[in-house]
Amino acid sequence: MPRDSRLWMTFPINFWMHPKIRPLSDAAFRAFVEMNGYSRMEDLDGRIPVALAKTMWRPKALGELLKNHPERPSLAIEGDHYVIWNYGEHQETRAAREARNATNTANGKLGGRPRKTQSVTDSVSESEPNKNQSQRSESEKDLTDVSYLPESRPVGDARADGLDELTGPVAGEAKAAGITDLPALRTVLAQTVGGPLSLRAALELAQAITKRAVGEVRDVGAYVAVACRNSPDEVRWDYDRLDLRVAS
């Protein structure tokens, strides 16, 4: 079957359940989807002229998107453009497309894609648990194994790394939540979600993960580490649901 050559836009399969998206009116939801599609078609990288947007979508719908989160709304205004939040995280940007085309062109001159030393199937089978294992509740696993939780790495500049937060409210909240080494836990969580996390974001994500536990969690750090190892998709779901991405 030939590959579909049309342009595509991508969203997480459950994005309509996101706390910022679910309360939107039908008109605002449609405007958000159409704005992503229009920006992709026209290579706008998530930046749509305000004057143009107002002719294509209802002002009330645009207004909803501008205020559906106090700090990270789906839409913002920068100068005379509407800017879609984290557009490059979900849709292909012009720079990414040009880089992909350049790679394809270079590979074509070499006779196709370079050979891989390891198949994708082999790589996945070695690094990911089987489906049945990942679907089991973490409460059924041995949560006393903390070998997956790394030691806190040495820090040269505590303020730059956010570790000074440990002397503030986040330190007390982490202690109350039963987390003994939040910086180390943050490292594990950041590796799982594929993006940087502040200490507070790591704390919120860890608490969301432990809320799913069926029984009592004796060691929060170990529990979260095992969840990252065996159920990374669920961890990333909490990460997206809580909208913990660091603004670029």
Image (cartoon, rainbow, N blue to C red):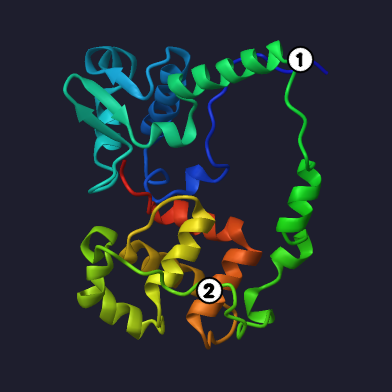
For label 1, the crowd category at 10 Å Cα-Cα, with few meaning under 14, some 14 to 19 and many 20 or more, is few
User: Where in the figure is residue 82, as x and y percent of width and height?
Assistant: 26, 25
Above or below: residue 215 compared with residue 100? below
Residue type highlighted by circle 2: Leu
204 to the left or right of 54: right
Residue 125: which quarter of the image? Answer: bottom right
177 to the left or right of 70: right
User: Where in the figure is residue 143, as x and y percent of width and height?
Assistant: 61, 82
Q: CA distance from mark 2 to mark 1?
A: 44 Å
Above or below: residue 203 compared with residue 18? below
Q: Secondary structure at mark 2?
A: loop
The residue identified by callout 2 is 149
Residue name at image x 31 percent, y 65 percent:
200
> Looking at the image, which residue sits at the far right?
1
Residue 137: which quarter of the image? Answer: bottom right
Q: Closer to the camera, 69 or 177?
A: 177
Q: Secondary structure at mark 1?
A: loop
Residue name at image x 41 percent, y 84 percent:
178
Which comes sooner in the sequence, label 2 or label 1?
1
Q: Closer to the camera, 34 or 248?
A: 248
User: Where in the figure is residue 33, as x and y percent of width and height?
Assistant: 45, 28
For label 2, the crowd category at 10 Å Cα-Cα, with few meaning under 14, some 14 to 19 and many 20 or more, is many
| Label number found at residue 111 | 1
Residue name at image x 63 percent, y 15 percent:
106
Q: Closer to the camera, 43 or 33?
A: 43
